[in-house]
Image: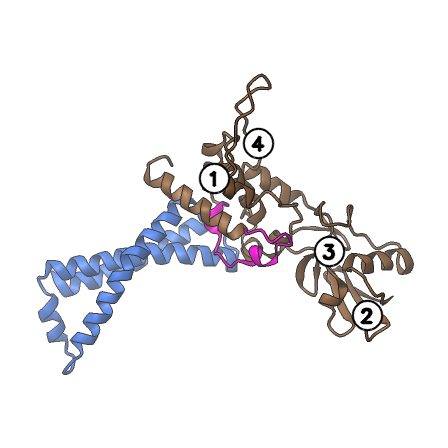
Amino acid sequence: MLNLRLYILQRITALLMAPLVLGHLAVMIYAIQGGLSAAEILGRTQGSAVWFLFYGTFVTAVAIHGAIGLRAIVHEWGGLKRPALDLFMWVVGLALLSLGARAVWAVTFA
Amino acid sequence: MTNDVLKVTIERSSDVQDVFEVPAFESQTVLDVVSWVQQNADPTLSYRFACRVGMCGSCAMMVNGVPRWTCRTHINKVLDGNEVTIGPLRNLPVIKDLAVDMDPFFDKWVSAEGVHHGALTRDDPIAPIDEDSAPRVGANAGIECINCSVCYAACDTVTGNPDFLGPAALQRAWTLLNDAKDEGRAAILDAVSDSGGCHNCHSMGSCTAYCPNDLDPMSAIAGLKRETAKSFFKGDR
C-alpha cells in the first residue's frame, strides 16, 4: 500500500526530523536548568522566527511521517483498505498538523 | 537415531490435523516422510513434488512452522524429539492438504515485470556480456531462484499486505534490471513503484534467512528502493 511517492515523503521527513529531534532534546535539557516556567519558555519563543521555523518544520514533518506510518500499520494489522485507508491517512495527517501548528503559533506569534 | 518411529502430524486443513506413525530410517528427508504416509498410510494425502533434488521448487512446505524445501531437508535436522509437524505453505491458498495454489505467487512475478523485455531479433549479433561488471554480478546473485515460494511463505509483510509482490518477484525484477540483455528498465521501475511494490518491504529479512539456495532477496529489494529513489529525484517518476 506504500507507493514510491509516500515512501520518499516518509524518508525525507525522517531525514528532517533526525536533527530536529536532537535539537529538541538539547533545548529541553538546557531549558529545565534552574526550573521551568511558562514565562521562561514564552520569553524565548514569542516573536521568534527561528523557533517558529524550527517547530513549524518539525510539526509538518511529524504530521506527514506519522500519517504515512500509521497508514501502513492500519493496513497490515487492521486490514483497512482503500479508499478508507487514504481517508484515514489524511485525517490523521491533518489532525496532527492542526494540533501542532496551533501550538507552534500559540508560543510564537499569537 | 534413538527412536524407531516418528510421530508425524500433518495439517490437512486449518482445523484438521492427522497424526501418523512413520518408521524412522537412517537417511530420510521430510519429503520421504510425506511420501511414506501417502504410499503406506493414507493414499488420499495430497502433496506436490517433482525432481527430489532441489531444482524444481515444487515441494516446499511448512515444517514445524518454518518454510522449507522438503526434498533437501533431512528429517533429523527438524525433528523435535521424534515429532514433526508438516503443513501447507503459508500465504498461499490451500488446494488440498499440503498442495497450495501457486497462482498468486507466479501472477506477481508477471506484475513485477519479471518477464523478458527483449529488443533484439534473431538476426542481431549476440550482445557481449562482461561477467565482472557490477550489474552482471548483481544479476548473477539472484538467478539461481527455483521459484519454490519459501521466501513468499516466510514473508510477514505478504501476510499483512496481500497486494505486496513479495521477495521472489521483486528479486526477479532486480535481476532483470541488472541484466544487460533486458530492455525493460522503465517498465520494471514503474511496476515495483506501485502500491504493491518494493517500498512496502520492512526489511525484516525472513526471505533471506529462509531461502534454501542462500539467495538474498532483501538486498535485491533494497537495490530496487535505491534505483526507484534515484529515478524519483531525477524526475523520471
| Mark 1 or mark 3, earlier in chain | 3
- Residue pointed to by mark 1: B135
Query: In the image, is residue B90 above or below residue B26?
Result: above
Q: Residues within 10 Å of mark 4 (few under 14, many from 20)?
A: some
Query: Mark 3, mark 4: which one is toward the viewer?
Result: 3
| Mark 4 or mark 1, earlier in chain | 4
Residue B131 among those drawn in magenta? no
- Residue pointed to by mark 3: B72
Please state which amino acid type lies under the numbered disc 1: Pro
- The hue in which chain B appears in the rendered picture of the protein: brown
- The hue in which chain A appears in the rendered picture of the protein: blue
Query: Which residue is rendered at x = 77% and y = 71% of the image?
Result: B83
Q: Is residue B69 left or right of residue A80?
A: right
| Mark 1 or mark 2, earlier in chain | 2
User: Tag 3's secondary structure?
Assistant: helix
Percent coordinates x, y for residue B208 in the rendering: 56, 55
Query: Closer to the camera, B141 or A12?
Result: B141
